[in-house]
Amino acid sequence: MEALEIKKAKDEIQEYLSHYNLNLCLTCGTCVSGCPATGTPELNGLDVRKCIRMLSFGMIQEVVDSDFPWVCTGCGRCAYACPMGIDIVAIMKKMKGLRDRDKVPGILHKGVINVLQTGNNMAIPQQDYFFLLYDLGRELAEEECPGFYVPIDKEGANIVFWVNSKEVFSDNEDMKWWWKIFYAAKENWTVPSENWEAVDWGLFTGNDEATRILAQRKIDFVKRMKANTMIMPDCGGGSFGCRLGMKACIEADPGNAISAIYLYEYLEDIIKSGRIKLDKSKNAGKTFTWHDSCKHARELERLFGRPYYEEPRWIIQQCVDNFVEMEPNRALSYCCGAGGGNWPMPFEKQSAFHGRRKYESIKNSGADVVVVGCSNCRDQLMRRLPKYYTDYKYEVKYIWQLVAETLVIEPWSEEEIEKAEKEAQKQWERLGVDTEGGY
């Protein structure tokens, strides 16, 4: 065996890595023991400890060219456990960023280009977006929420809500869960006409500049609309990427500071204040558990000191009588395997292997329904893992879906309905949407 040749990294990479001092690494293996990707067959024995050692020896390009930074979900179990406090997640994100953009796996970089150029990852035309919001909103109004419509670019709104392009592109009906909640709470809310994308694929590709731009767009919209606050996007890439981007924007200009809340804070507030009413009997006969998504829990705690562990559990227990914990949970919870962009990337087998620990936690809990707060987690747990692990059946629901399904919707007055319908008609005319007499 030839002796390993220590290489000299480029100055700018050395400067970046100097902030993390890889010489502190004890090679103890704690990171490897905590990482669910350890042992992934397709990685040819590469693991997080080996990657860190390679980087410390200047083997930057070898790590950049490998699949490991992309199979890594950024779940943070390694960094959370590291006795020397090395931020391995940030280092792996940097390795993604060093990959030539035409070699970024799958559709992720195309999505970044799309969102920068068109305002959403799927490059959905604005008029298609408008008509879908009109048509689905009209459908919900006819089904159970008379007077409902989706307010677009509404100045002075209390809440700004960001839309996931996946739902606009394909999972249309999933948008109705939040809409029903806003309707029941009689919320003054709005969505943007442009740059409405919730999810930050810049985070998934190591593109820090894209993350900053997307956050600045959100800041600018909230300020321009004179809105009170915004709900952080649900997806880990959406909320955590937005949080990182906003931090960079505020550091560059303190005037960029705006009010932002997490979806758990919003749901907790409208339940506690009595703005919505819930009927637990609608969920009788089933046992529910909660999946702690990495970016809303462990990583948020590690980097921002404010995780959301107890709030979602409290919300769920306002909706159901039978709640059980998965083990492990909270900061020690296992990643589902879809983080870091792994849901849309071409690493399905690796992602499913990563998620085996989460599947075991679900199975051991005995729960009938797994409740989640992230769209990538939901897709992974509902669509991918059941393809690979078939001996235990369970349902998956968004936490806002659970709340929406548990709602007792009190009727609006005739005056409220008439006022909303007039506002809606005026809006759709302003936006050039042909409502064909829908209102």
Image (spheres, rainbow, N blue to C red):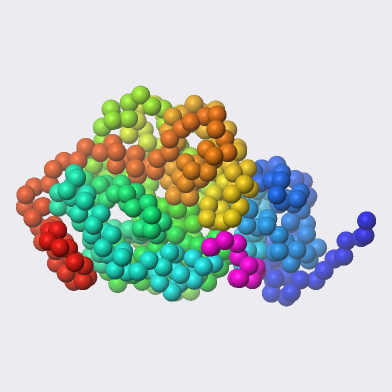
Residue 192 magenta-highlighted = no
**In the rendered image, the vertical position of residue 386 relative to residue 170, given as above or below:** above
What is the residue that sits farthest to the left in this orientation? Answer: 415
What is the residue that sits farthest to the front in this orientation? Answer: 436
Residue 202 x %, y %: 52, 65
Instruction: Using the rendered image of the protein, determine whether residue 145 is visible from the camera's viewpoint.
Output: yes
Residue 59 x %, y %: 78, 64
Q: Please give left or right for residue 76 compared with residue 149 in the image.
A: right
**In the rendered image, the vertical position of residue 381 relative to residue 245, given as above or below:** above
Give me the residue at 69% from left, 64% from top.
64
Magenta-colored span: 98-108
Give me the residue at 74% from left, 59% from top.
22
Instruction: Using the rendered image of the protein, determine whether residue 233 is visible from the camera's viewpoint.
Output: no
Q: Please give left or right for residue 305 compared with residue 11 in the image.
A: left
**In the rendered image, the vertical position of residue 59 relative to residue 74, given as above or below:** below
Give me the residue at 55% from left, 29% from top.
391
